[in-house]
Image (cartoon, rainbow, N blue to C red):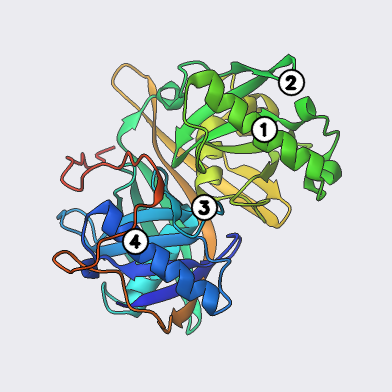
Amino acid sequence: MNVSLAKAHGAPCPTAVLDGRAFSESEPELLSALADLRADLRGQGAGDVLKNAIVRPSRHPLFDLDYRFVQSLPHSHDSFDLRGSCGHSILAAVEAAARTGMIQPLVPGCRVRVNVLNNGDNVVCETEKTSDRGTRFTAHFLCSPPLRPPELLMTGEPVTDVPFEDRSVPVSLVSMGNPYAFVDASHLGVSGPDALFGDDPRLFTAMTRLRVAVCESQGWDTFGAFPKIAALLPQEGGGLFVRAVSVPSWHPTVALTGAICLGAAAGIAGTVPWSLAGRTARNPDTLLTVRTPGGCVRVAAHSTQDPDHVRRLAWVSVAEKQVEYRGLLRRSRTPAAQPGSAAGPRIPVLATSAHRSEEAPWVPLTA
């Protein structure tokens, strides 16, 4: 079983990229194999690798790769969450798939179309520049068909009041790339970007507790990594300062899906990102500048108008995402048993998977 390691700059850790053709599609057996891999990684001093991408040539004629993301959780070595996706890991998977011959070599201008099995996302990874060590991409998250931006609101409203510590905190719950809870950092006692970007354990605790409160208020499972949470402050002249929580600590920048979700949310009137981003960012097709502890990300949302002049979101893009390829992992353990073997799989602690079948219909973008 080939396992490659690749890391997108700005990601909290590398991604282990596995050839999905070597696995059973049974989730218990897949997760048993991932638990074995996790033990291997820990034994080789790479226990910080908590992202797994399972890829194979796509069965769908409109895609190049089928991709499934599995987040390793810190609770135990066989604890995982399959419910969401990871944009940085999508880029890492494309890099590894090209390096190992699963897809064509990457050259500037080529596009790799990824079918995300976890949530049905359609992602196009466009190569900007290649080198011996890695590749720079632009990632496009497509809405197929284009969506009215309010359709991305998880509660149907731009702001949801969440009971939290004897008060009510306004939060925007938006799903694009991944589900996110966006909160004005001032509601958590943060006065400016220095305080937002400082290593304040009280802020981290407040954000993780608020995420749990969001889930409880909506009747969602609090276990796992999703929805994610990010605290925002306005930039002078437009744009946002962003601090996000990853697994199991602060995100060094912001997740690629988080940037994508922010780009979409900033175009929805009344949301926390819309309210804070400033006038220049409220044009839905204006570049949104997102500043994080680890640097700046620029997000571009692209929309169309239907015959009734209703704006619809077509895609959201983030450019200049560099991925470093770190090579094949040397395995020291025997992979988990495949179907028909005498050994049965372990039963992992697992958040319910809500991935869609790869056979789900896909509507090509015509706008």
Q: Amino acid at mark 4?
A: Ser
Q: CA distance from mark 3 to mark 2?
A: 26 Å
Q: Amino acid at mark 1?
A: Arg
Q: CA distance from mark 2 to mark 1?
A: 9 Å
Q: Amino acid at mark 3?
A: Leu
Residue pointed to by mark 4: 32
* Crowd around label 4: few <14 · some 14–19 · many ≥20 (10 Å): many
> Which mark is drawn over residue 165?
2
**Quadrant in which residue 289 is drawn:** top right
- The kind of secondary structure element at disc 2 is loop
* Quarter of the image that includes the C terminus: top left
> Which mark is drawn over residue 209?
1
Q: CA distance from mark 4 to mark 3?
A: 14 Å
| Mark 2 vs mark 4: in front | 4
Give x and y (percent) for residue 209. Answer: 67, 32
Mark earlier in primary sequence (2, 1): 2
- The kind of secondary structure element at disc 4 is helix
Looking at the image, can residue 112 be seen? Answer: no
